[in-house]
Image (cartoon, rainbow, N blue to C red):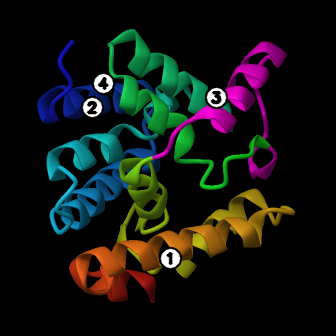
């Protein structure tokens, strides 16, 4: 099945119907942020970025889960031949390529854990992976926000873990790299970011 905006949007609609929740609006804002920022990067496609952002949490279609949504999303996309989208379903949660930096619960089988551990360590990240990692932290279900607002939102829900600060630091480094590429602050491109962060 060809992956384009229409098929990605249809997949998200169907997934949302299976498991309604704020994750759908969050995914839409991640996609919009990816599209806007990629549009300022000469080497990225805004359409591809939008699609990857839209599908990054597609594994949530099975229900309310923790790290299981990563591998469920990977399988969902691989079944349709969407290999890069499948990678991002896992990579978006591992800005540091070490499964030990997870902040969630591994509600998966041992075989799936070992698969994901190897997948994370062996994956070759590109700027689409890094863009979704950053934009995942720029989007609440209610709109765009400052990274720190999302950091606190996630930490309230998942708690503080040994890798929490290292994960924040990595996202901030990614933001600096993208801002160097686009020549402006990412926040200046995202409408309502200040109002939604108050």
- 3D distance between C-alphas at marks 1 and 3: 27 Å
Report the residue at 64% width, 28% height from top. 119
Q: Which residue is mark 2?
A: 13
Question: Which numbered mark, 1 or 3, is in the foreground of this view?
Answer: 3
Q: Secondary structure at mark 3?
A: helix
Q: Residues within 10 Å of mark 1 (few under 14, many from 20)?
A: many
Image x and y of residue 7, in percent: 18, 25
Whether the residues at callouts 1 and 3 have beta carbons within 8 Å, the answer is no
Marks 1 and 2, how far apart at CA? 27 Å
Disc 1 target residue = 147
In-front residue for pair 64/120: 120
> Circle 1 sits in a helix, a strand or a loop, which is it?
helix
What span is colored magenta in the figure? Answer: 100-125
Residue highlighted by disc 4 = 14
Give yes or no for contact between labels 4 and 1 (Cβ–Cβ under 8 Å).
no
Chain-order first, disc 1 or disc 2: 2
**Does 39 appear above or below 54?**
below
User: Is tag 4's residue or tag 3's residue first in the polypeptide sequence?
Assistant: 4
Horizontal relation, residue 172 to residue 158: left or right: left
Q: Indicate which label's residue lies in the foreground, 2 or 3.
A: 3
- Residue that numbered label 3 is attached to: 119
Q: Is residue 166 above or below residue 91?
A: below
Image height of 41 relative to 86, above or below: below
| C-alpha distance separating marks 4 and 3 | 27 Å
Please rate how many residues cluster around mark 3, counting C-alpha atoms within 10 Å: few if below 14, some from 14 to 19, many from 20: some
Q: Residue furthest right?
A: 162
Residue drawn at x 29%, y 74% as measured from the top left: 181
């Amino acid at each position: 099945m060809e992956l384009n905006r229409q098929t990605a949007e249809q997949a998200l609609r169907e997934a949302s119907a299976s498991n309604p929740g704020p994750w759908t609006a969050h995914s839409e804002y991640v996609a919009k942020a990816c599209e806007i920022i990629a549009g300022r990067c000469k080497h990225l496609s805004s359409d591809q970025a939008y699609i990857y952002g839209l599908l990054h949490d597609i594994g949530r279609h099975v229900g309310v889960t923790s790290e299981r949504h990563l591998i469920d999303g990977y399988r969902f996309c691989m079944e349709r031949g969407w290999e890069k989208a499948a990678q991002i379903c896992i990579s978006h949660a591992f800005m540091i390529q070490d499964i030990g930096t997870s902040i969630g619960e591994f509600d998966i089988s041992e075989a799936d854990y070992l698969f994901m551990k190897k997948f994370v360590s062996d994956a070759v990240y590109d700027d689409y992976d890094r863009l979704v990692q950053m934009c995942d932290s720029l989007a609440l279900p209610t709109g765009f926000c400052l990274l720190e607002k999302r950091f606190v939102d996630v930490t309230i829900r998942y708690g503080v873990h040994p890798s929490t600060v290292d994960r924040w630091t990595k996202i901030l480094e990614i933001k600096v790299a993208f801002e160097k590429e686009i020549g402006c602050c990412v926040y200046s491109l995202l409408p309502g970011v200040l109002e939604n962060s108050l």
